[in-house]
Image: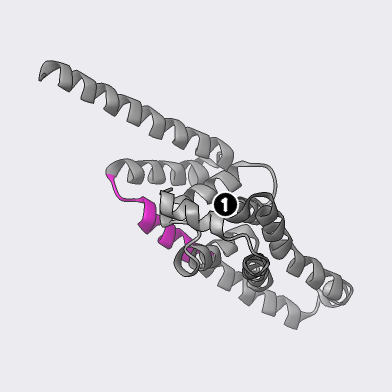
Amino acid sequence: MGTSMRSTFEERRSVGDLLTMFLSFFKIGAFTIGGGYAMLPLMEQEFVQNRKWVDPVEIVDVFAVAQSLPGVIAINASIYIGYKVDRIRGALVAALGVILPSFLVILCIAAVLLRFQENLWVQKAFAGVRAGVTALILLAGIKLGKAILKNYLAWGIGIGAFFLLVIVRIQAVVVILASALVGLGTYIWQQRRKQLREKDNP
């Protein structure tokens, strides 16, 4: 990240800024159904496009790190972004903001939902919600793909990772680590080729 963006993060330390961040994460937590993946397009819009707290490439790294670590991807990503904004305070505020809506809602509706979960109307309503969540996840994939799939290497890794996840059904953590090794190995190979060319053509 550039110096300008780092200075932007360092300036966001007032109570008002923390409240703004809390409300941003609270809104995402309150209006996202389907878990962390369904939050991706909302996080991308809020923190990349609207707030400018994270750049389009870094948000992909955030989601990759959040997915590869233990815990819920939404909470992991929120803590990461919150920490970028205001270190420990930001991480705590972000985590609280994204968790609190689910905590409050589930307390309010758990008893009622358990009584009516076999109701046909309730089942059909949730079937529609799941379809909408699928569209959100697809939208997130398209937006993130535009930001990162800009060369043949990225496309190759993306297609290979998709094949391993969907066809071979390898765990996501293994695929992420393998992709990282491919990217690192390709960079080392390119650097060595560059050094060889410089030696041949001084």
Across and down, in percent, residue 13 comes to 62, 60
Q: Can residue 59 be seen in this view?
A: no
Question: 142 or 26, which lies in front?
Answer: 26
- Which residue lies most toward the top here? 199
Q: Specify the segment rendered in magenta.
A: 137-151
Quadrant for residue 147, please give it: bottom left
Q: Is residue 140 magenta?
A: yes
Relative vertical location of residue 29 with respect to residue 165 in this rendering, above or below: below
Tell me what residue is drawn at x 30 percent, y 25 percent: 189
**Could you say which quadrant of the image residue 37 lies in?**
bottom right
Q: Does the magenta stretch include residue 146?
A: yes
Image quarter (top left, top right, bottom left or bottom right) of the C terminus:
top left
In-image side of 156 versus 161 (left or right): left
Q: Identity of the amino acid at label 1?
A: Lys
What residue is drawn where x is 79% and y is 72%? Answer: 105
Name the residue located 58 percent from the left edge and 39 percent from the top edge: 173
Instruction: Give how far across and how far down residue 26 sits, in percent.
Output: 68, 69
Give the residue drawn at x 70%, y 60%. Answer: 93
Give the side of residue 61 with respect to residue 145, left or right.
right
Q: Residues within 10 Å of mark 1 (few under 14, many from 20)?
A: some
The residue that mark 1 highlights is: 84
From the top left corner, tell me how far across and down residue 18 is, in percent. 66, 64
The answer to whether residue 140 is visible is yes
